[in-house]
Amino acid sequence: MIPAVAQTLAKILAGGTSLISTEQIDFNHPSWRKNAEPGLNLYCYDLRANSQVQQLERQVESSQNPGQLPATLVNSATIWFDVSFLVSAWDYTALGEQRLLSEALMLLLQHRCLNEELLACELQGYGHLSLTVSTAHSPDTAALWSALGVPLRPALYVTVTIPITLPDTLVNSELYLQGGVLDSDPLKARL
């Protein structure tokens, strides 16, 4: 599913910026590039369970079963995750990089929800997917870049909330959610 998100973002970015094709988008670690050709770097740096979507699903399930107490049991075979990408630009000049990053920002801000027709096949069938764009990463932007071992540079932080469907063997198991962590132990999943 993660490659499908990267492909979806690359297709959107290549179709609406001055980039000619998705081949000008690099998915590797955002280290210094030997090739100074203009392009974008789309690096997946974080993946975590989205407890807000899980909570919303539980509320919907409990409202469909009036008279029952809200449960912490996750009945759905689908678990939602936030996949975060670091988007940086490369060009011959700093102004060229800023122009390309500005184009990417303007384009991504138009897609607060990724419509089904924009999504890679693996992501279709779940409705629109949420996309958020930020120019600052919390808690500390400099710490992220330092952890990557790369000098600080302008970037966008893009998060897409995606579904992960469990295989049938796990669907029959009871899974409990606490603070974005799934566990089979109901004692660990108290509200």
Image (tube, helix red, strand yellow):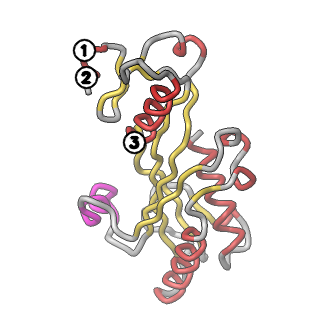
Sequence order check: which comes first, mark 3 or mark 2? 3
The quarter of the picture where the C terminus appears is top left
Give the numbered dot on residue 52. Answer: 3
Which x, y percent locates residue 35?
56, 71
Which x, y percent locates residue 162?
54, 43
Q: Secondary structure at mark 3?
A: helix
Is 131 drawn above or below residue 142 in the view shown? above
Q: How many numbered discs?
A: 3
Residue 48 showing in the rendered view:
no
Tag 1–tag 2 contact (CB < 8 Å): yes
Residue type pointed to by label 2: Arg
Closer to us: 126 or 59: 59
Residue type pointed to by label 1: Leu
| Magenta stretch: helix, strand or loop mostly | helix
Image point (70%, 47%), residue name: 120
Q: Which residue is mark 1?
A: 187
Q: Is residue 155 magenta?
A: no
Q: Residue at the far front: name it.
A: 67
Give the numbered dot on residue 109. Answer: none
Q: Secondary structure at mark 1?
A: helix
Is 39 drawn above or below residue 157 in the view shown? below
Q: Is residue 146 magenta?
A: yes
As drawn, is 7 to the left or to the right of 82? right
Q: Which residue is mark 2?
A: 190
The quarter of the picture where the N terminus appears is top right
Q: Secondary structure at mark 2?
A: loop
Residue 44 showing in the rendered view:
yes
Image point (42%, 19%), residue name: 67
Q: Residues within 10 Å of mark 1 (few under 14, many from 20)?
A: few
Q: Which residues are magenta?
A: 140-150
Which x, y percent locates residue 77?
55, 23
